């Protein structure tokens, strides 16, 4: 029988491929929002017993990861009406192919880590690895500053998946602190994005090259 | 109640955002003084934390806390003078962020829980970002963007590293609180593979924030674009906070018998940073960037010494303390240079010895101290590191270390000579008020004093901290 978690994780993997192939920012933001929602509800289906506090925390995570953070970025680009291309350094076709290779490689290496919880949910570790690498990839392979922020969020989603999937001991208050930090970080990035747009009339990071050495 | 030390600056910081323009300056000095008093009180009484699952008073934390407190107090006095001269549009944001920054850094020194440590270090990034953007120029915008993005991504890796350490607890079947102190006690039972992986991620993550090469690219931009009092804090104490994260993880590694593994990686990153600084310092054209590269060098030296262990680790902690004192004094003096000459290029300065004699004494003294001249503390620290490295038999590393330090000294000296005695037709647009030179003197004198006379409790605390990573005589 296919475990419901694996179905969810397949959706996450698909969203990674989608984000690699998106050329337009609104589509990319929607993909990341979808990914945030799916990643946040994974804890509901993993074997841990849910307490009332756990449920409340998961809902808060869902709100912040899936709705507030993407909305912040969406508003940031809407307000300043920037060009909607992500300006890739690595092309979309190459990115997609790379994404496929990445998923295969992640599935291939995952069993070698021998993690205790990994046997129940075969896709958990491969998805986490894929998200981590995919976030890094978007950070490096897109020149558009907003796409870079989205890459950072994908990376954070990957870390969240590792945290919830494999370690069961974090207190909710601590996890909430982490979430708050991420949220504040994205807010500051959104403010900087608006200022970059006003100062340079674009968010192409190729313009940010005056400070060197 | 230990938590009050970071709660006070937190609340005054929030208040400062709503205060009228100049009222924030007094609040800054006042909070600095109260914070210093509380830190000293903490040294004397060493109380237990209220939330002892998350916070604890540790020897290395106490050392960093006292340095932060003293520096912030002196810097806040300088800031009152600086703000009168410098043209800063939204001063309340500046003072508020300074206080929040102090609060988050204090929280780092008191954190015991691995994740709380991460939260605090990430919070320092967020609190200091507005400081770098104070001048609202295109260059400062670029510096802030690089700082926030590179540090956030770097620190995200440290979060992954922290999660992997909890995985090592699961795999090893250990059930203790996820706190540095508890983990150090049961380190031998943690799964070594995941512990090592976690350490590497934490080192890369916090190493980004500490300015270790090759993750240092944001540092010269951020430190040069921030207003000088903020640069002094960024360079003097923020780097120490990141180091504290690495230090505490290294403690676990040492208790787990994996000190060779962590030591080798620290040595490699340390040497890479020293070499990177040596490469770039020669052709610097701006004096604040020069100081920033010198910070990268010193962080490299500290990582190198920590990796060597033994005498080297003791030397590293000495370097850490003295670097904070001296480098913050240099950055404050660079603020006077910037206000005086109105130019950030070395080209645009000259004849400082004649035009700004008091700043010259502080700047030149700071230069001599940071380059490792006796009798300043960096000299003693570096000497211990070199002796420790000889004892450990890493001759190639010592060769590279000494060569780079010589190159850095030569480059640094050339630039400082040009600023101090070089001829230029620059004129000076400020008078050297006492509040803008005495803090530098106080910092340098503290460094000097610590070389000749160290209070016994201070020495014991350093030894206590260093012993836990296999250092000492």
Image: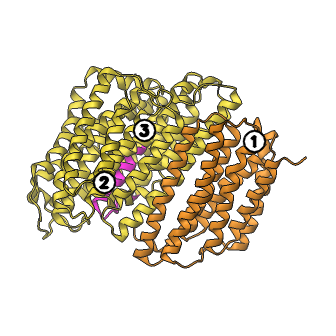
Chain colours: A orange, B yellow
Residue span colored magenta: B280-300
Q: Which residue is depicted at the point 24% across and 46% down? A: B28
Provide residue A13's location: percent of width, then percent of height.
75, 58
The answer to whether B326 appears left or right of B198 in the picture is left
The answer to whether B102 appears left or right of A5 in the picture is left
Q: What residue would you read off at disc 2?
A: B17
Q: Nearer the viewer, residue B324 or B186?
A: B186
Give me the C-alpha separation between circle 1 and circle 3. Answer: 33 Å
Q: Tag 2 or tag 3, which sits nearer the N-term?
A: 2
Rendered image: mark on residue A46? 1
Provide residue A44's location: percent of width, then percent of height.
73, 44
Rendered image: mark on residue B108? 3
Mark 3 residue element: helix
Q: Nearer the viewer, residue A138 or A46?
A: A46
Q: Nearer the viewer, residue B394 or B454?
A: B454
Mark 1 residue element: loop
């Amino acid at each position: 029988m296919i475990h419901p978690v694996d179905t969810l994780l397949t959706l996450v993997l698909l969203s990674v491929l989608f984000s690699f192939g998106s050329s337009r920012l609104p589509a990319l933001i929607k993909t990341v929002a979808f990914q945030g929602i799916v990643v946040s509800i994974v804890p509901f289906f993993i074997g841990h017993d849910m307490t009332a506090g756990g449920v409340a925390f998961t809902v808060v995570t869902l709100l912040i990861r899936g709705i507030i953070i993407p909305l912040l970025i969406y508003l940031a680009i809407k307000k300043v009406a920037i060009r909607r291309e992500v300006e890739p350094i690595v092309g979309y076709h190459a990115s997609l192919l790379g994404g496929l290779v990445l998923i295969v490689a992640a599935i291939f290496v995952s069993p070698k880590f021998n993690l205790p919880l990994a046997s129940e949910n075969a896709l958990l570790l491969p998805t986490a690895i894929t998200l981590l690498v995919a976030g890094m990839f978007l950070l490096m392979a897109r020149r558009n500053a907003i796409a870079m922020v989205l890459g950072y969020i994908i990376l954070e989603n990957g870390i969240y998946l590792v945290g919830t999937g494999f370690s069961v001991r974090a207190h909710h208050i601590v996890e909430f602190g982490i979430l708050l930090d991420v949220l504040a970080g994205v807010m500051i990035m959104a403010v900087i994005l608006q200022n970059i747009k006003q100062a340079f009339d674009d968010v192409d990071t190729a313009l940010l090259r005056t400070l060197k050495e | 109640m230990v938590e009050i030390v970071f709660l006070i600056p937190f609340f005054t910081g929030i208040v400062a955002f709503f205060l009228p323009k100049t009222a924030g300056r007094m609040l800054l000095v006042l909070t600095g003084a109260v914070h210093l008093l509380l830190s000293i009180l903490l040294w004397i009484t060493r109380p237990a934390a209220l939330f002892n699952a998350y916070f604890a008073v540790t020897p290395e934390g106490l050392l960093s806390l006292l340095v932060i407190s003293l520096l912030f107090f002196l810097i806040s006095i300088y800031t009152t003078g600086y703000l009168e001269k410098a043209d800063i549009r939204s001063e309340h944001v500046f003072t508020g962020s300074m206080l929040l920054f102090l609060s988050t850094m204090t929280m780092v020194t008191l954190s015991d829980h691995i994740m709380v440590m991460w939260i605090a270090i990430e919070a320092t990034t967020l609190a200091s970002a507005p400081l770098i953007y104070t001048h609202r120029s295109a260059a400062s915008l670029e510096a802030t963007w690089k700082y926030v993005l590179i540090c956030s991504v770097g620190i995200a890796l440290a979060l992954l590293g922290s999660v992997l350490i909890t995985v090592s607890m699961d795999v090893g079947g250990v059930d203790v609180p996820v706190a540095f102190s508890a983990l150090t006690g049961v380190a031998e039972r943690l799964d070594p593979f995941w512990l090592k992986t976690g350490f590497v991620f934490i080192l890369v993550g916090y190493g980004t924030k500490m300015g270790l090469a090759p993750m240092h690219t944001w540092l010269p931009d951020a430190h040069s674009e921030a207003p000088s009092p903020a640069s002094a804090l960024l360079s003097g104490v923020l780097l120490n906070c990141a180091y504290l994260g690495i230090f505490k993880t290294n403690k676990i590694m040492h208790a787990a018998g994996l000190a060779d593994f962590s030591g080798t990686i620290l040595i490699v990153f340390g040497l890479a940073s020293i070499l990177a600084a040596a490469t770039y310092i020669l052709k610097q054209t701006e004096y604040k960037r020069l100081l920033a590269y010198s910070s990268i060098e010193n962080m490299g030296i500290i990582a190198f010494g920590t990796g060597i262990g033994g005498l080297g680790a003791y030397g590293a902690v000495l370097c850490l303390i003295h670097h904070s004192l001296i480098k913050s004094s240099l950055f404050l003096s660079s603020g006077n240079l910037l206000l005086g000459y109105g130019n950030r290029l070395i080209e645009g300065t000259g004849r400082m010895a004649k035009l700004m004699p008091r700043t010259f004494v502080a700047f030149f003294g700071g230069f001599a101290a940071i380059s490792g001249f006796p009798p300043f503390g960096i000299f003693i620290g570096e000497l211990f590191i070199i002796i420790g490295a000889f004892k450990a038999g890493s001759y190639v590393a010592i060769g590279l270390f000494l060569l780079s330090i010589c190159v850095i000294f030569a480059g640094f000296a050339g630039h400082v000579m040009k600023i101090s005695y070089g001829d230029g037709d620059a004129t000076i647009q400020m008078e050297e008020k006492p509040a803008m030179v005495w803090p530098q003197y106080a910092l340098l004198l503290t460094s000097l004093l610590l070389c000749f006379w160290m209070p016994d409790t201070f020495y014991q605390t350093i030894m206590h901290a260093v012993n836990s990573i296999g250092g000492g005589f």
